[in-house]
Amino acid sequence: MPITQTTTADSVFQLQRANHSSKRKLDDYGDEYGADAGADFAGGDPEVAYAAGFLAGIKREETKNASNSRYRGADARVSSSTPSSSRAAQFRSGSRSGSRLQFFVRMMSRGNTVVMQASPHDTVKSIHERIMVLTGIPVFEQGLTYRGKQLQWENTLQECGVQNDANLHLVGRMRSTEHPQAWQVLENMVSLVFRLCRGEIVHEATKVIKSLITSYMNMAPKVDDATASYFHIFVASNAPSMLVTLYISPYAGNKERGDLFVRHFLNSCRNNMAKPYHAQCASVVLELCSLLMRVGCDDPLYLHCRNTLGSMLESAGCCHVYAGKHGKGGGSILLQDICPFVRELSNRLLRDLELCIQRPNSSGPLQTDVSDFAAFLTPLRKGITQLQAMRGMGLDEKCHEGILLAEEVDYLHLIFIQMLEKMEQCLRSMQEFLSDKLRRDRDVGLTYSGCSQYLSILKELYQISKLYDGAEEKFWKVLMNQRSMLCILVIQYAKRSDDHQWILDHRSVTNFEVRRHLAMLLFPDVKEDYEELHEMLIDRSQLLAESYEYIAQAKPASLHAGLFMEFKNEEATGPGVLREWFLLVCQAIFNPENALFVACPNDCRRFYPNPASKVDPLHLKYFSFAGRVIALALMHKVQVGIVFDRLFFKQLAGKSVTLEDIQAADPYLYSSCKQILQMEADFIDSDALGLTFVREVDELGHRKVVELCSGGKNLVVNSKNREKYVSLLIQNYFETSISEQVSHFAKGFGDILSNSRQQPFFFKSLDLEDLDWMLHGSESTISVEDWKAHTEYNGYKETDCQISWFWEIVGRMPAEQRKILLFFWTSVKYLPVEGFRGLASRLYIYRSMETEDRLPSSHTCFYRLCFPPYSSKAVMQDRLRIITQEHIGCSFGTLNWSLPPFSFVDQRITTCCYHHRQVMEFFGYLIKILGNHIQIVVKPTLHDGMNVGVHWKFEWKKIHVPLGNGFSFHICQTYHGKAVIKNIEMFMEPLLHLEPYRLNPTN
């Protein structure tokens, strides 16, 4: 019977296939190959025989022999052999055990016959594949009949009743006319690959075969049902087997070609097919994976194929519990198809975990193995969940004929038990290693290299634990016992791209550092690239308004890049200035005078939105702005000295407010509600309180009655409904009245996160105390010992007398004076909760080359304090006393000044002034002398330059008043008498006639 002929206009399909064309009649194949074929291919080409043996082995049906090698029940033990797959072991044992059949295949109508041997459990398809290796006839063009019936591919020889010395007949098989062009493409490709497997030299074979694969993928339909049948053609054409045969072929260049073709097909499936069609592609990739597994579980092509299959299964989530319509021949993946890969990967992971226990410096489990393990578990867990649901519905009778094997479910439970035990041992080993390292090196840095994948493995074990009774409790018990190691793993290895909700589902195994770390992962990375920073130039006198314009009007993406902050008329820039801006703008936002937020009566640091904020028509926009600023402060790790009240925090987390949540915000209302709930029932039922379901609201000076529920003014509060009354009252007071404000604040906060939809998760992942520590910082008195331990020296040695004096003086300072010194030094007003260890950098003391009449200076960006080698402790104490005055230490980021002696030389007044208080005193002295002829207004600013003193030089008409001789500024008369210099804005009344004055320096 002739094979159906098809044509195509594409020249790539017009191949010269010599005598091996699969378009020839079956009789033609018989003449060429039948006479050379002997029993078991003994007289044929040894390379063809090798490939034939490989194909025959890997396609043998395994389910009949699986009972001897499958793991049964939770008491089974994982094999300690190499993880090359239990299926391969089943094939080998099946080949050696039991009787062998010998039968005859009449190859052609002219009578040529081949003697073949096979196991009764071999499939009919495996016989077709061996015939294809012999003859080159594609499998899909073959048919085998026995006793007048055509044998089906999926049946075994035993199921077909084939016995010893049976006579089978090879006949032509009419190919399906569905997707005829795809059949033609694959026919051409298989024919070319077959010729390469035989060692033939085919002109431009690599280019043509790759082009054929591309053409086949490009023709794939975009309809689910059609896609499934389309990719079934790829398997039916025996293309996977031929590609793998090419890969293992010993002929020069064939391995590389096979690798190229398989990878090209896999990459096309993964990248060119939309995710909804990955389930259909996965059946072909599964076939390739099953074949390549026999080549070796460490083979690079197999690993790539396995990874592709896992990712496609994970994205498609395809796994059918039952066969039939969606099973055999339907292009879907069965549960038992996935289990061999889960077995292989679990064995590899257990082996690598054992190595971590024995050798702490081992590399540990591979990231690719862990990710593949997770990928294959996704559909497997889904299938088991479906099975459990069916059992719950009383559908157990449908689980028959080994379609879903119960031992697969039990085996996954076994994997969980064994891997959890192994992980517990690994965590203990890790703890011992780090404890020894701490005792030996006094260094808590994590150098336990093998633990990088522990967190990912634990996540998968947690997902498995939810499938089995009691498993989840056992899982959390292990982690609770190893809580400290889990916390180290989270902080060290948790990534932004991962889902960490599973850890927070059981908060008892976490600590503040873990919760903070997971919450901070929701923010984008702060970038240091100055070309991408969001630049702000802000006038201090218009701080809130201009900050609003820069932050509220910006696109969220531009704020993700980081901030570059500068105050107008000031040279200072850098992180120190940015930290100061955060402090100032947060003080302005939460200043009760601005009516945006209300402070709690007994804790002025704790705030919640002001229900009366609507007095400002822009108040909602300012709440969005406030949300952005707070999120930015958290992202930049700046403690701003404010905290949120519990009722505000809970609403940001998407939770309802309860009575206990309002205690700090409104102690009076809290006490009143408590009394109502605790009153005797008879008293409250007597209506002695005269309460109904209403509350009075003050709106812009007018009293307004608001019903708490429909018909509330006629609903009397009694003992039965008082709990509802209290709940509705709290809801109206603290939810309804500020819902818009909270919503806009949350929206602004979410704008700064990497994904704005994660805003509720940010607050859910934290306790209120966690957020307090993140926003406010430490409330403990600054420890001088901690301060000293985190300070380094440049130009000084720790043993120098100046350093000893410095720490002695600091140790005697009151707590508030230490805070001022710290702010002067670093622009950090509130330390992180960890103390100095939580700062972004260590602190530094530099030796300056100035004379000892100079005060200390600081470079807050670099956490650097500079002072000259003072001659005595008394001199140093006096200088430190000056810079730790509140109006000095918190006014300049860099100070460098001397005491201002006045002198008069040749009609010139000379002095050095470095602080606004001295400037004002000196200008007051000038005004006293000059009277109404001059009026000066000074606006001091923060300066954060390096070793730059604040000096001024005046030149005006006949008066020449230079102040200082260092880094100076020059001011001369300007239009309308207004002159602006970096650090000072002055307004002078123009004088037309002003004679020089002689000043007595003693005045």
Image: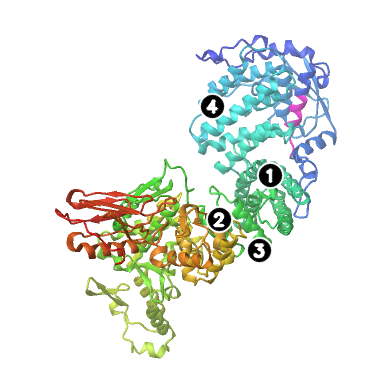
- In the visual, does 172 lie left or right of 166? left
**Quarter-wise, where is residue 482 in the image?**
bottom right
What is the chief secondary structure element of the magenta stretch?
helix
What residue is pinned by disc 2? 842
- The amino acid type found where label 3 is placed reads Met
- The amino acid type found where label 2 is placed reads Arg
Query: Marks 4/2: CA distance?
Result: 58 Å
Query: Compared to 36, does 364 lie above or below?
Result: below
Query: Marks 4/1: CA distance?
Result: 29 Å
4 and 1 marks in contact (CB < 8 Å): no
What residue is pinned by disc 1? 342
Query: Compared to 140, does 27 lie above or below?
Result: above
Query: Marks 1/3: CA distance?
Result: 27 Å
Q: Secondary structure at mark 4?
A: helix
Q: Can you say which quadrant of the picture contains the C terminus? A: bottom left
Residue 573 visible in image: yes
The verdict on residue 347 being magenta is no
Q: Earlier in the sequence, mark 3 or mark 4?
A: 4
Residue density around tag 4, few if under 14, some if 14–19, many if 20 or more, within 10 Å: some
- Residue stretch in magenta: 52-62
Which of discs 1 and 3 lies nearer the camera? The answer is 3
What residue is pinned by disc 3? 480
The verdict on residue 57 being magenta is yes
2 and 3 marks in contact (CB < 8 Å): no
Query: Compared to 167, does 438 lie above or below?
Result: below
**Whole-percent x, y for residue 234 in the image:** 60, 27
- The amino acid type found where label 1 is placed reads Val
Which of discs 2 and 3 lies nearer the camera? The answer is 2
Q: Earlier in the sequence, mark 2 or mark 3?
A: 3
Tag of residue 217? 4
Q: Earlier in the sequence, mark 1 or mark 2?
A: 1
